[in-house]
Amino acid sequence: MFGHFAIYSAALVLVSCGHPKGTSSVTPGSGSDQAKLPDGPPLVTPGERMSYRLSLQGVSLAEYTLGVGDVEDLGGTQVVLVQGHAKTIGFASFVAKIDDTFSTWIDVKNGRTVRYRTDEYEVNSKTNIEHTIIDLRERKDDLVPVSFHLNDRPPQPEPQKVSLPELWDVNSFLIALRSWEGAPGTTTSVEAFRSRYIWHLDVRIGKREKIVTELEVGEMTALRFDARTYKLTRAGGKDTTSDERNFSIWISDDDGRVPLQIVARTDYGDMKMQITDYQPGNGQRLRP
């Protein structure tokens, strides 16, 4: 039941596992009550690398890494590559073949996605690989072109209708959370791509909490974000065949603002993604 989406991290990864447990208290604001994710350079450092372990009820299922590349030119736009990689481990490897890569080219000036690409095994397959490319520069009004192909077959267009002025993906969304600040209770609503599909998220800033990590420092103070999310159809409406999901993210409350933990509540227990290693990188941080 955990499947591909449960194995992938970031903001949306854990929330598609099983069925939602309980109801979410995160409700979107309206008008001036709605905040927005920050503008400006993304809070990343070339060479930065984060490693995580995904577990359910204490059983390790997968490993996930998030790495930051160098600044490069992409069709005249200066971007930085943020790349995630998920891979099943142990017993989970016999249940699901997951060895997937999620690549985001983020504009170094405004922190928004320029291009998003995924290369991942098809659900319930150990041979077929799905490839998706989304170029946000090609957006026309409320339509975003999505190119999808299986293995070496010709790419097929799957245009996606959106309703919000800004679009994210799971990588750029998580990076944006690193620099989002506000009073507890502040909310925002976003739309973010995960693979070839888009999800709506309502996110709320929570309180600062102490959490214990496997990093050398051990216990850390972290800022908590609570969220609910649901899948959208290609026409941009809520997918009534997909349940709402609830999850929380903890980001270190220090200068590094490192994502430390994601927890999704499911009928099978809490699905956790916890940091196991952090390398700060050797370049200059793009956001002062």
Image: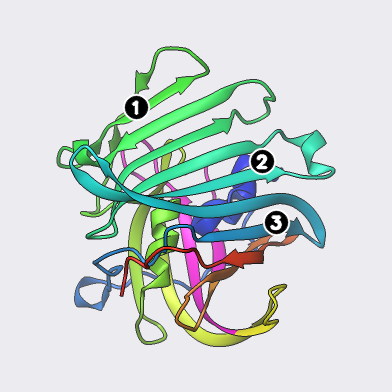
Residue 244 shows in the view = no
Q: Residue furthest left?
A: 141
Q: Amino acid at mark 1?
A: Glu
Badge 2 is on which residue? 3
Q: Please tell me whether mark 3 sits on a helix, a strand or a loop.
A: strand
Q: Is residue 238 magenta?
A: yes
Q: Is residue 202 visible?
A: yes
Residue 39's x, y, as percent? 24, 67
3D distance between C-alphas at marks 3 and 1: 31 Å
Q: Nearer the viewer, mark 3 or mark 1?
A: 3
Q: Amino acid at mark 3?
A: Leu
Q: Is residue 131 above or below residue 241?
A: above
Magenta stretch, residue numbers: 221-248
As shown in the figure, which amino acid type bears the numbered disc 2? Gly
Q: Residue at x 59, y 48 (%)?
A: 8
Which of the numbered marks, if any, corresponds to residue 1? Answer: none
In this view, 115 is above or below 219: above
Residue identified by numbered label 3: 54
Between residue 138 and residue 186, name the one nearer to us.
138
The reply to whether callout 3 and callout 1 are in contact (CB within 8 Å) is no
Whether residue 9 sits left or right of residue 164 in the image: it is right
Which image quadrant is residue 215 in? Answer: bottom right
Across the whole image, how many numbered discs are drawn on residues? 3
In the image, residue 207 lies at what x, y percent? Answer: 50, 86
Q: Is residue 61 left or right of residue 182?
A: right
Q: Which of pointers 2 and 3 lies earlier in the amino acid sequence?
A: 2
Label 1: element kind: loop
Residue corresponding to mark 1:
158
